[in-house]
Image (cartoon, coloured by chain):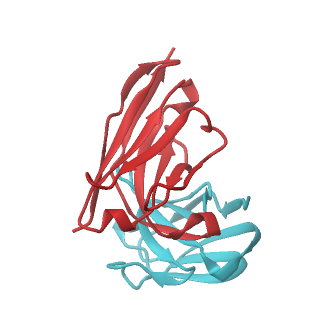
Amino acid sequence: ETVLTQSPGTLSLSPGERATLSCRASQSISNSYLAWYQQKPGQGPRLLIYGASSRATGIPDRFSGSGSGTDFTLTISRLEPEDFAVYYCHHSWTFGQGTKVEIK
Amino acid sequence: EVQVSESGGGLVQTGGSLRLSCAASGFTFRSSAMSWVRQAPGKGLAWVSGISATGGSTYYADSVKGRFTISRDNSKNTLYLQVSSLRAEDTAIYYCAKHVGYCSEGSCYFDYWGQGTLVAVSS
């Protein structure tokens, strides 16, 4: 079973800054089937990125995904106030532990 | 518009049972695999169970195997999770999620999620 490790645990940034979130897999993920989700308090998760780099419907282009093999990255180019949330990576039956993006 | 909506959660004593339901609309339910994912208070997401589009294949996390049963009624566009022999560590919000692809083959993601239903297990 693949283990996903996200870093950092918390990212403290200001609106307008760039956020870089990492997800590392314990073994290579074939065909880059790695997804990213955003979750805000009191809400269910929302799909942001699938296939490592494809944006889901309606997701702004400030969100981008990259990577392959065991190392994947979610980048938010310029943080908007509504982007402060928790982000999870996901492969098959496994989720990472999450990265919280908080206002500095 | 795609919608999935969970219900059936509540407060239950250790060892008790509940049946969770997930009503789906806005997509061809009988063609979509589905999963249940839970989130303990203040914790991250944890996959619990999945089921193929026809219901012929089911999958469980080791932590719930033998205690939880996933099923679906494609005529009612509804997904179920029977949770039994509940323990304190089963306390969580339970989400249903629609699949794209095949998690059993390592090639899937969850494109729509509900708002969740809370299961609280007390001793």
Residue B79, compared with residue A49, is above or below; it is: above
Q: Which residue appears at 47% of the width and 37% of the height?
A: B92
Residue B42, compared with residue A23, is above or below; it is: above
Query: Horizontally, is B88 left or right of A48 in the view?
Result: right
| Occupied quadrant, residue B102 | bottom right
Residue A50 position in % (x across, y down): 50, 76
The quadrant of the image that shows the N terminus of chain B is: bottom left
Q: Which residue appears at 27% of the width and 54% of the height?
A: B75
Q: Is residue A33 visible?
A: yes
Residue B4, compared with residue A59, is above or below; it is: above
Residue farthest along the top direction in this orientation: B123
Q: Which residue appears at 43% of the width and 40% of the height?
A: B81
Q: Is residue A77 visible?
A: no
Q: Colour of chain B?
A: red
Query: Horizontally, is A9 left or right of A28 in the view?
Result: left
| Occupied quadrant, residue A91 | bottom right
Residue A79 position in % (x across, y down): 43, 74
Closer to the camera, B9 or B31? Answer: B31
Chain displayed in cyan: A
Closer to the camera, B62 or B89? Answer: B62
Q: Which residue appears at 74% of the width and 58% of the height?
A: A1
Number of marks present in the image shown: 0
Residue A98 position in % (x across, y down): 57, 57
Residue B12 position in % (x across, y down): 42, 21
